[in-house]
Image (cartoon, rainbow, N blue to C red):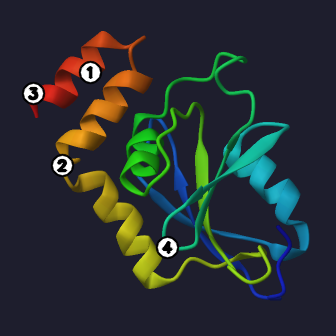
Amino acid sequence: MTSTHATALRALRIGFLHDLEETTLDPARIVEALDESVGCNNFDVVGLEDDIDLFVDDEGALNGSRLNLRATIIAHQLGTPTVLFGNAVALGCNPNTGDSISLTTTQLHRLRTALVTRPAPAIIDQLAVGLTAFPGLVAMLRRH
């Protein structure tokens, strides 16, 4: 999770209340920058397709953080069916070293497209299983 680049890392913040926000993180203080951006003391990494990592609150479901439906849908759309709480930050991942790197324009487009594209029926079924505690959301997903 280190970075070999001296320039700021291009990232995408996925808040549960706000739109997707492109941001930059200082690679010299990446852990602190992620703590601040995610808004927690302990974060976890969720690996997605296309060498994208989502940094999320490790204890979000336990500490009262709100469901992040945007990040949850993106994770499902990009191959990792999981339910996420609190804010999330997406960064690129060097597949050879595991280091955090800037998101490419293609990766940013992939993240945005994953959110605005209607999930396939199989993904909606996966979302329904993970979101059983939120029956209103499940009904909304199945309707649209």
Determine the CA span between mark 4 and mark 3.
29 Å
The answer to which image quadrant residue 28 occupies is: bottom right
Distance of label 4 from label 2 (alpha carbons): 19 Å
Percent across and percent down for residue 133 are 42, 11
Q: Which residue is mark 4?
A: 50
Disc 2 or 1, which lies upstream in sequence? 2
Are the residues flagged by discs 4 and 1 in contact, CB closer than 8 Å?
no
- Disc 4, disc 3: CB below 8 Å? no
Quadrant, the C terminus: top left
Residue at figure coordinates x 18%, y 41% from the top left: 121
Q: Earlier in the sequence, mark 4 or mark 3?
A: 4
Q: Which mark is drawn over residue 118? A: 2
Badge 3 or badge 1: first in the primary sequence? 1
Circle 1 is placed at which residue position?
Answer: 138
89, 97: nearer the viewer: 97
Residue type at numbered disc 4: Asp
- Give whichever of discs 4 and 1 has the lower sequence position: 4
Residue linked to disc 3: 143
Using a 10 Å C-alpha cutoff, classify the residue at mark 1 as few (fewer than 14 neighbours), some (14 to 19) or many (20 or more): some
Place of residue 29 in the rendered image (x, y in percent of width and height, measured from the top left): 89, 66
Q: Amino acid at mark 1?
A: Val
| Camera-side residue of 139 and 81 | 81
Task: Give the residue displayed 29% in from the left and 63% down from the top.
Answer: 113
Element under disc 1? helix
Q: Nearer the viewer, residue 106 or 24?
A: 106
